[in-house]
Image (tube, grey):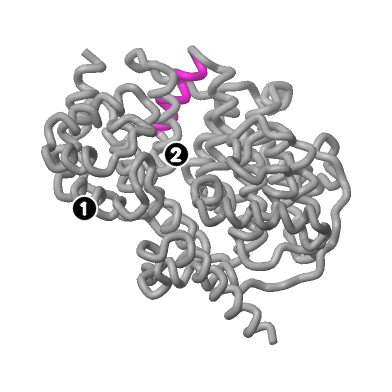
């Protein structure tokens, strides 16, 4: 009976895809990895709900936080205060990009250079970034390190008690760089916020809730995408999902109601603490991803593409959120006839052409990780997220990536030129 329900759910998903755009979403034409992912999100364990009462402003359980506080004391005690590294003048966004991407690649010395600049010039901004980087790039890979980053990044008094800002920054950045990484929370947010099929599903869930057809306290069934969708509806979002400035109380309620008897307390506490302290949508997405993906696999390194010799910084620092990165991508669009022709045909004008290229480059090298947590569900989310177009149709993404791979030496040359010019 259970297998029949799972098969029926897969058929419904395939029907929705085919109904939305028959020529684009034929189930028989789905990428094999995506087929595996769709099956994995449907065939999930069904459990009875166990409501966990509490408010986001006063967590009902803090056993994990007490243990993590002890680990923080031990960790910081093992570090002596390290002097800040002197650097050329950055803007803070380039420094933040260096910090985050160096953590992704376990490049501690580069991460410390960025930390030094930010601590000296924008200390408040540095400490705000630390928890967000942890929620975005470490997450389920190491919930202890994620919780540590949230705690020290949002509590100035705690940093003083642990030995001061420089010592704590040195310890937490080192721990974050060495940690097992997982981007499921960010990938899940990307998919839920951008996939039109999931938007239609939220509308259907909302309409069912309005007519009392959806049990309001039922546990989520149907995999990580359905769980995230159901939590979003319970939090009052049917359309676009904002990344910040969300109502902490309603999202905390959505987390508590989605928790089951088998949910890790560490996952609940980390998600609620992240929500309480940062107000980021990544916190409830972390919970949804962890609730539906409990397998533990060995960490693996992503395949890193060739990069030219370092100018002042490695070029994989440059993404679509820095003006230096955008300048490099602007140069590339100007020099490549192939990508220019592609953008003329497919770009919809919702974002600039350099940002379209930047989003594609992110998939290829800016978002690559060392020590990535191996998981079928996490890999499926990554595949799904990277198949969605930003400023171009989803089905045009493979063609764009093919062009960029073919011309990656030119992309690197343009980024190197942009960096060289910036530091002149």
x, y (%) of residue 122?
A: 52, 15
Is 290 positioned to the left or the right of 399 in the image? right
**Is residue 111 part of the magenta span, yes or no?**
yes
Residue 130 in view of the camera: yes
Q: What is the tally of numbered marks visible in this picture?
A: 2
Q: Could you tell me residue 47's position as x and y percent?
A: 76, 71
Q: Which residue is at a point 46% across and 21% down the rendered structure image?
A: 116
Q: Is residue 251 left or right of residue 358?
A: right
Instruction: Report the magenta stretch's main SS.
Output: helix
Residue 182 visible, this angle: no
Q: Is residue 212 above or below residue 109?
A: below
Q: Looking at the image, which is closer to me, 223 or 399? A: 399
Q: Are marks 1 and 2 in contact (CB under 8 Å)?
A: no
Quarter of the C terminus within the rendering: top left
Of the image marks 1 and 2, the number of the one nearer the N terminus: 2
Q: Characterize the local packing of mark 2: few (<14), some (14-19) or many (20 or more) Cα atoms within 10 angstroms.
A: many
Q: Nearer the viewer, mark 1 or mark 2?
A: 1
Q: Is residue 348 magenta?
A: no
Which of these two is toward me, 280 or 366? Answer: 280
Q: Is residue 275 above or below residue 32?
A: above
Q: Position of residue 210 (x, y in %)?
A: 79, 53
Q: Circle 2 sits on which residue?
A: 103
Residue appearing at x 16%, y 40% in the figure: 341
Q: Residues within 10 Å of mark 1 (few under 14, many from 20)?
A: few
Distance from the alpha carbon under mark 1 to that under mark 2: 28 Å
Q: Is residue 167 above or below residue 13?
A: above
Label 2 secondary element: helix
The magenta segment: 109-120
Residue visible at 57% across and 51% down in the picture: 199
Relative depth, front residue between 346 and 36: 346
Residue 401 in picture, x, y percent from top left: 25, 50
According to the picture, the residue beneath numbered tag 1 turns out to be 402
């Amino acid at each position: 009976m259970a297998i029949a329900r799972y098969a029926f759910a897969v058929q419904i998903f395939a029907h929705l895809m085919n109904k939305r755009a028959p020529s684009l979403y034929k189930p028989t034409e789905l990428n094999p990895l995506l087929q595996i992912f769709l099956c994995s999100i449907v065939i999930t364990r069904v459990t009875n709900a166990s409501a966990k009462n509490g408010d986001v402003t006063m967590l009902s359980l803090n056993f994990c936080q007490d243990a993590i506080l002890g680990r923080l004391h031990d960790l910081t005690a093992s570090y002596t205060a390290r002097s800040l590294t002197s650097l050329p003048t950055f803007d803070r966004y380039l420094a933040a990009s260096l910090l985050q991407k160096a953590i992704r690649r376990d490049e501690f010395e580069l991460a410390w250079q960025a930390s030094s600049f930010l601590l000296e010039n924008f200390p408040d901004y540095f400490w705000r970034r630390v928890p967000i980087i942890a929620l975005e790039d470490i997450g389920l890979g190491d919930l202890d390190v994620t919780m540590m980053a949230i705690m020290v990044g949002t509590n100035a008094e705690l940093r003083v008690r642990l030995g001061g800002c420089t010592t704590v920054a040195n310890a937490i950045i080192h721990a974050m760089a060495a940690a097992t990484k997982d981007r499921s929370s960010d990938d899940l947010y990307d998919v839920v916020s951008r996939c039109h099929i999931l938007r239609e599903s939220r509308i259907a869930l909302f309409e069912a809730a309005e007519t009392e057809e959806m049990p309001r306290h039922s546990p989520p069934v149907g995999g990580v995408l359905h769980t995230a969708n159901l939590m979003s509806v319970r939090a009052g979002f049917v359309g676009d999902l904002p990344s910040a400035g969300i109502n902490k109380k309603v999202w905390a309620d959505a987390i508590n109601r989605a928790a089951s008897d088998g949910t890790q307390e560490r996952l609940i506490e980390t998600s609620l603490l992240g929500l309480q302290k940062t107000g980021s949508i990544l916190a409830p997405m972390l919970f949804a991803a962890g609730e539906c993906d409990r397998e533990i696999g060995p960490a693996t390194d992503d395949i890193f593409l060739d990069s030219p010799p370092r100018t002042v910084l490695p070029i994989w620092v440059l993404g679509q959120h820095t003006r230096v990165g955008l300048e490099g991508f602007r140069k590339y669009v100007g020099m490549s006839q192939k990508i220019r022709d592609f953008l003329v045909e497919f770009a919809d004008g919702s974002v600039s052409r350099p940002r379209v290229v930047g989003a594609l480059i992110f998939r290829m090298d800016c978002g690559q990780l060392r020590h990535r947590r191996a998981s079928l569900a996490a890999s499926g989310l990554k595949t799904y997220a990277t198949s969605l177009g930003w400023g171009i149709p989803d089905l045009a993404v493979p063609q764009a990536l093919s062009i960029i791979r073919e011309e990656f030496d030119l992309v690197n040359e343009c980024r190197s030129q942009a960096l060289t010019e910036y530091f002149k």
